[in-house]
Image (cartoon, rainbow, N blue to C red):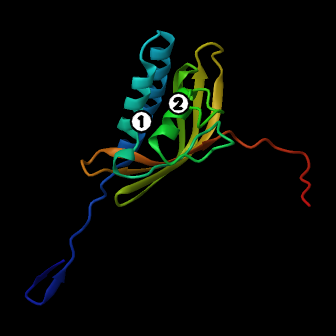
Amino acid sequence: MKVKAGKTKFKTTKKTITKQEVLDKQKAWGEGIVAIGKVYSAGGDYKTAAKEHIKHFYNYQEGSVLFKPTLAADKQFRRDFSGALSYFIGGDENYPEDHGFAIKPWCNVRWETVGIKIIGNTALTMGNYFFTSESAKEELKVEYSFAYTKNSRGELKIILHDSHLPCKHYESHEYS
């Protein structure tokens, strides 16, 4: 706030994140998932590819990330880098249910964003994303909510990743 000759002036704060930045980051994230699977299929260093993907897209460098991956039920909430890495590539004895979501492999990730809400240095988004398998050419529909922030270097990073398979409709609900 600047004060001049008895008048108060408020600085206008420009939003630090744009809708287009979020859409671009989503597209790049999907391309990264596809790339990890390609490295795995080619017999390459998919573990390094997955680590670089996580470093590039998630803000673990500056704190915890709230990460709830799609196909996790026993340890479904992950608050550290190793939990995210395990989900993407599997092989971590601390997460025996993980089989490596990113090494499936997928040939495409398509986004249907329902909405993006930008509040200062935070962007919230939700919708569906569809993973096309390399072998079956069928899409797996997944619901998502992501939150992004700009880190100290001005890079857009994920701070919340929540995804899950859509709920199946039931003919009857019996609760006791």
**Residue at image coords 59%, 31%:** 130
Q: Is residue 115 visible?
A: no
Counting from the top left corner in percent of width and height, residue 132 is at 59, 22
What's the amino acid at mark 2? Phe
Q: CA distance from mark 1 to mark 2?
A: 9 Å
In primary-sequence order, the first of circles 1 and 2 is 1
Counting from the top left corner in percent of width and height, residue 7 is at 14, 86
Work out which quarter of the rendered image holds the N terminus and state it: bottom left
Q: Count neighbours of disc 1 (C-alpha within 10 A) and say few if under 14, some if 14 to 19, many if 20 or more.
A: many
**Residue at image coords 39%, 52%:** 63
Q: Are marks 1 and 2 in contact (CB under 8 Å)?
A: yes
Residue assigned mark 2: 88
- What secondary structure is marked by label 2? helix
Disc marking residue 54: 1
- What secondary structure is marked by label 1? helix
Instruction: Quadrant for residue 100, please give it.
Output: top right
Relative to the observer, which residue lies in front, 152 or 45? 45
